[in-house]
Amino acid sequence: MATKAEVLDFIRIYADKMAEHRQELTDLDQAIGDGDHGINMSRGFKAVIEKLPTVYDKNIDDILKAVGMTLVSTVGGASGPLYGTAFMKAGAAVKGKEELSDEDLILAFEEAVGGIQLRGKAVEGEKTILDSMIPAINAIKASIAAGKSMTEALVEAEAAAWDGVEYTKSIIATKGRASYLGERSIGHQDPGATSMAYAFQAANEVAAKAGN
Ligand code: ADP
Ligand code: MG
């Protein structure tokens, strides 16, 4: 279960993480891209934080939609439209909800990943955002199906996300800017998979704090 306050908390914590890890994400992108991923994500989420007070009194779906639209309009790189679509699709999946059940959350995650795939045309194993996101969502689904709580599921999701980040070091990038490097992308950690793992870290921290 997630309340609107928790959704807002998640957005704030993730924005803080994007500011905090700006240099790390940029350094990762410097190695296999154009060195702007940390700049893109921190700029986008800074704009989100400025926008947030205007949607405090809205439903969760409108809040998520506003986050997505802000990212699309403020981030120039590939990651803006991809993360933006994820938040917009997650919002559309929970229309009218003032609180999210575990099923709502799973649906929101699935729609978010579906949005990223629709836009980016990537699958797992191409050294992208999806390589931490899909294993994390699968971990949530497996944990909930096994009768665990969402708080427990998110602990496992974060672990799966970081395993996915580690896995990106071993594969060739076949989508996005890093694909220009071909085999030379092997050995490098994907920046987008890393920023997505921080999203599951933020979700895990929010759930742990709420203790449901
Ligand atoms: P840009 O590549 O335009 O400079 P960023 O540096 O902000 O944008 O983001 C790069 C990240 O975007 C990559 O590390 C990768 O994870 C992700 N990415 C790129 N293309 C795709 C795609 N088609 N699907 C999913 N993720 C992608
Ligand atoms: Mg880049």
Image (tube, rainbow, N blue to C red):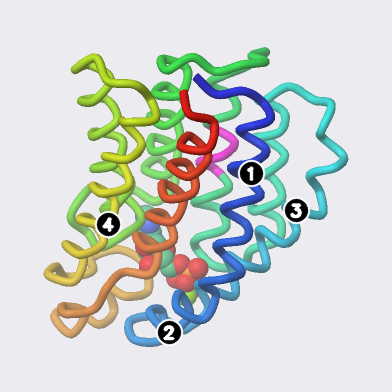
Q: CA distance from mark 3 to mark 1?
A: 12 Å
Q: Are marks 3 and 2 in contact (CB under 8 Å)?
A: no
Residue at 16% in and 78% down: 186
The part of the image, by quadrant, that contains residue 29 is: bottom left
Of pointers 1 and 4, the one earlier in the residue sequence: 1
Amino acid, disc 3: Ile
* Residue situated in front as seen by the camera: 148 or 34: 148
Q: CA distance from mark 2 to mark 1?
A: 25 Å
The magenta region covers 85-89
Task: Inspect this view and state whether residue 168 appears.
Answer: yes
Where 2 sits versus 44, above or below? above
Q: Mark 3 = which residue?
A: 49
Q: Mark 4 = which residue?
A: 162
Residue at 41% in and 46% down: 200
**Which tag is nearer the camera, tag 2 or tag 1?**
2
Query: Where is residue 24 shown, x and y percent of the image?
Result: 45, 78
Of pointers 2 and 4, the one earlier in the residue sequence: 2
Amino acid, disc 4: Trp
Q: Mark 2 = which residue?
A: 27
Q: Image check: 4 left or right of 165?
A: right
Residue at 33% in and 82% down: 32
**For disc 4, does the CB lie below 8 Å from ligand 1?**
no
**Which tag is nearer the camera, tag 1 or tag 4?**
4
Amino acid, disc 2: Asp
Q: Mark 1 = which residue?
A: 68
Task: Inspect this view and state whether residue 182 appears.
Answer: no
Of pointers 3 and 1, the one earlier in the residue sequence: 3
**For disc 1, does the CB lie below 8 Å from ligand 1?**
no
Q: Are marks 2 and 4 in contact (CB under 8 Å)?
A: no
Q: CA distance from mark 2 to mark 4?
A: 18 Å
